[in-house]
Amino acid sequence: MFKLRNLADTFSDLDGITAFESRENRYSRLRLLSQRGVITPDTAGRGKVARYSLEEAAIARLCLSLYDAGLDTETLRNLDIAFRPHFAGEEWRHLSSVLKGIHDGESWVFEVDRHRDNLGSLGASGRFRREDQSTFTDEQKAGLAEFNTAQGRKRESTVILYATDLLRPLLD
């Protein structure tokens, strides 16, 4: 279990951040993620110090990198489905299976597509995949293109995080 302050310090150390103000900025961002429900403590309450599970710490680590890539808190909150159990192609995917894979030596990435709809609103969708796998099969790509067209969405950019590099230190 991790305390928010410990996570901020650990992430700052991993990223080589030494300036006090920058380290405090990391802590503030983590607090905001918690306040907005992007990460959820396992223990909290009046008079209790909030503690976060390994999976929530991993989400926090990825979200800080996505902040650095220009995503805002609301967008990060909308990525929640990518971190929770979901069906991906032919298998159920969950952050715990990604962490287990990293522990076992697999290389994983986390991809976020940013898109704009016909009203001009920005949105995002995210997914984990092993680095040696393609993002989608041709059939899935066709279905996704059809869905996006029907929704009036156009992809603007893709952010790729090397999840293995970001998350492996949490497993040590």
Image (tube, rainbow, N blue to C red):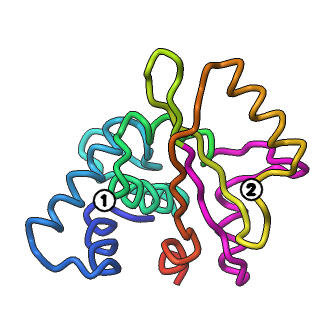
x and y percent of residue 49 in the render? 29, 53
Q: Residue at x 78, y 61 (%)?
A: 134
Q: Quadrant of the N terminus?
A: bottom left
- Give the side of residue 127 with respect to residue 72, left or right: right
- Label 1 sits on what residue type? Leu
Q: Nearer the viewer, mark 2 or mark 1?
A: 2
x and y percent of residue 84 in the render? 64, 45
The label on residue 135 is 2
User: Label 2, label 1: how many angstroms apart (C-alpha)?
Assistant: 33 Å
- Label 2 sits on what residue type? Thr
- Give the side of residue 28 with respect to residue 56, left or right: left
Q: Residue at x 65, y 50 (%)?
A: 127
x and y percent of residue 81 in the render? 62, 39
In depth, the one of 136 and 65 nearer the eye is 136
SS of the residue under disc 2: loop
Q: Residue at x 86, y 47 (%)?
A: 89
x and y percent of residue 148 in the render? 68, 27
Residue 168 within the segment the image draws in magenta: no
Q: Which residue is disc 1 drawn over?
A: 4
The answer to whether residue 46 is above or below residue 63 is above
Q: Residue furthest top?
A: 119
Q: Earlier in the sequence, mark 2 or mark 1?
A: 1
Classify mark 2: residues with Cα within 10 Å, few (<14), some (14-19) or many (20+): some
Please provide the residue range marked out in magenta: 84-113
* Badge 2 vs badge 1, beta-carbon distance below 8 Å: no
The answer to whether residue 159 is above or below residue 23 is above
